[in-house]
Amino acid sequence: MTSLPTPGTGYLVRPPDRPGPGILLLASPWGLSPGVKDKADELADAGFTVLAPDMNDGVVATDAEHAHALLLEADMNVSASLAQSSLRLLQVACPDPQTPVGVLGYAAGASWALWLSVRYADQCAAVATFCGTQSISFDDAKASYLLHFAEHDTDVTDEDSALMGLNLQLARREFRVERHDGVASGFAEFGHPNFDAAAEAIAWRQTLEFFAANLLR
């Protein structure tokens, strides 16, 4: 494990034996919390090189209201620049800098992950998201997608997810939707008031299998 200075800062971790395929981990507005770093460590243990940029510049939200305020205060241009530079830095840290990587995003981080997969299509092979959407065309994308949604999500409506699914279908992208019953947005984020350990365990297993199938082949 190590810290990586970038135009912002980030958390970089590699597998214990040798560098593996890359995964860019984009956290929710709650920030680069210990729980996010734990997930990066778990991905590294599974064989991946992981970079989690700090989109909040060192601030970790203390509650939902604080997280929402951080989201509203964020400069979208700065966030976009950090996401882009982190993607490039991750590739440099991987065994082959030309090999496309995976992207994992939560909430607003999920939206950035989806955007990156279109804007930098040649660099993104697999994208997994939790509770996030984009109302964009995926015609230029080349990635496969795993999309996790919560049954009770106040931020992502059924219409939002249906529209994105339609756009992915129109672009003929391979994608899978997992809807998790009885949970709300944030169910997969340790420390979030809506965290649900049982649902998170199922979603995490699905996510690891997805990245293994698309990146470790």
Image (cartoon, rainbow, N blue to C red):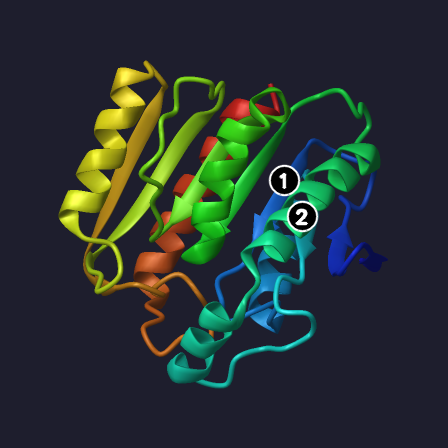
Q: Quick check: can you spot residue 212?
A: no
Tell whether 81 sits left or right of 195: right
**Mark number, residue 66:** none
Percent x, y of residue 149: 27, 50
Percent position of residue 17, x then y: 83, 40
Mark 1 vs 2, N-terminal side: 1
The kind of residue on which mark 2 rests is Ser
**Image side of residue 85 versus residue 206, left or right:** right
Q: Residues within 10 Å of mark 1 (few under 14, many from 20)?
A: many
Q: Nearer the viewer, mark 1 or mark 2?
A: 2
> Residue 148, percent across and down?
32, 46
Which secondary structure, mark 2? Answer: helix
Alpha carbon separation for disc pair 1 and 2: 18 Å
- Relative to residue 130, is residue 182 depicted above or below? below
Residue appearing at x 37%, y 49% in the figure: 203
Residue 188, above or below 44: below
Q: Which residue is mark 1?
A: 23
Query: Helix, strand or loop at disc 1?
Result: strand
Q: Which residue is mark 2?
A: 81
x and y percentages locating residue 118 in the rendered image: 49, 28
